[in-house]
Image (cartoon, rainbow, N blue to C red):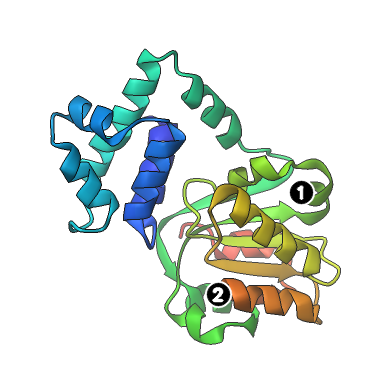
Amino acid sequence: MDQLETIIAGEICLSKDPSSSMKKWREIFGISQTELAKHLKISSSTISDYEGGRRKSPGIAIISRLVEALIDIDSKRGGKVRKQLEKDFKPKEDVFDICEFTKSLNGKEFADKIEAKIVANPSKLKETKVYGYTIIDSLKVILEVPVHEYMQMYGKTPERALIFLQVETGRSPMIAVKVGRFSTEMRPNVVVLHGIEKVDPIAVKIAESEKIPLLTTMMPVEKIKKVLEGK
């Protein structure tokens, strides 16, 4: 599988609702259930059952076949969707510093490693898995990155921590996360506000309403990278 296929398959596999994620990607490519089923040589009711959650979530092998089919069908149409997605997935290196873990890290363990304080949703943090992190220049994201490009901050999967730098109160990063969810249908597993101790109550309310554990840390960025290296 190439990078785009891996990103899509990874999101479906790691999603809390893989059925909806499968449907979302089929619709993004503008492919009907019937057309996809024909390409895969299965019944359209099978696709419908997977997307409706009436069948057990498929394993990685089936998801890989499904994603490859979406890419193949799009390629036969000229590859317009793929080209747009590859453009959207290309990271803005000066804004997003993306790292993927080789295995998941428990949310509480992640917080302990970066010496973070838990500001919102501590109970949810204990059941959260983190598969990577993205260090984000808050000012550049807010000033320079269009909302439709927010997907880039999620790397290979949204099951990750977003670490926001240059934060004043935490309100703007949390608003960006909330707005980004409506644009990309993605949200992070954890949000970390770097360099502040007092968080805006609005930021806390957004985190609570979105059910996202919100952390703060004063640990230097280079040390954060070092303690999370090799995860």
Q: Position of residue 61 (x, y in %)?
A: 20, 42
Asked which secondary structure carries label 1, the reply is: helix
Of residue 44 and residue 98, the one placed in the foreground of this image is 44
Say above or below: 157 vs 224.
Answer: above
Q: Does residue 139 appear to the left or right of 225 in the view shown? A: right
For the image, the number of numbered tags is: 2
Tell me where residue 217 sits by quadrant. bottom right
Locate the N terminus by quadrant: top left
114 lies above or below 229: below
Q: Are there few (<14), some (14-19), or many (20+) residues within 10 Å of tag 1?
A: many
User: Hey, what amino acid is under mark 2?
Assistant: Lys
Q: Answer above or below: position of 169 versus 8.
A: below
Q: Which mark is residue 141?
A: 1
On residue 211, which mark appears?
2
- In percent of the image, x 26 and y 31: which residue is there? 36
Is residue 221 found left or right of 45 in the rendered image? Answer: right
* Residue 146 place in picture, x, y as percent: 74, 41
Residue sitting farthest toward the left: 42
Q: Residue at x 81, y 78 (%)?
A: 200
Of marks 2 and 1, the one in the foreground: 2
Q: Earlier in the sequence, mark 2 or mark 1?
A: 1
Disc 2 packing (10 Å; few <14; some 14–19; many ≥20):
some
x and y percentages locating residue 83 in the rendered image: 52, 22
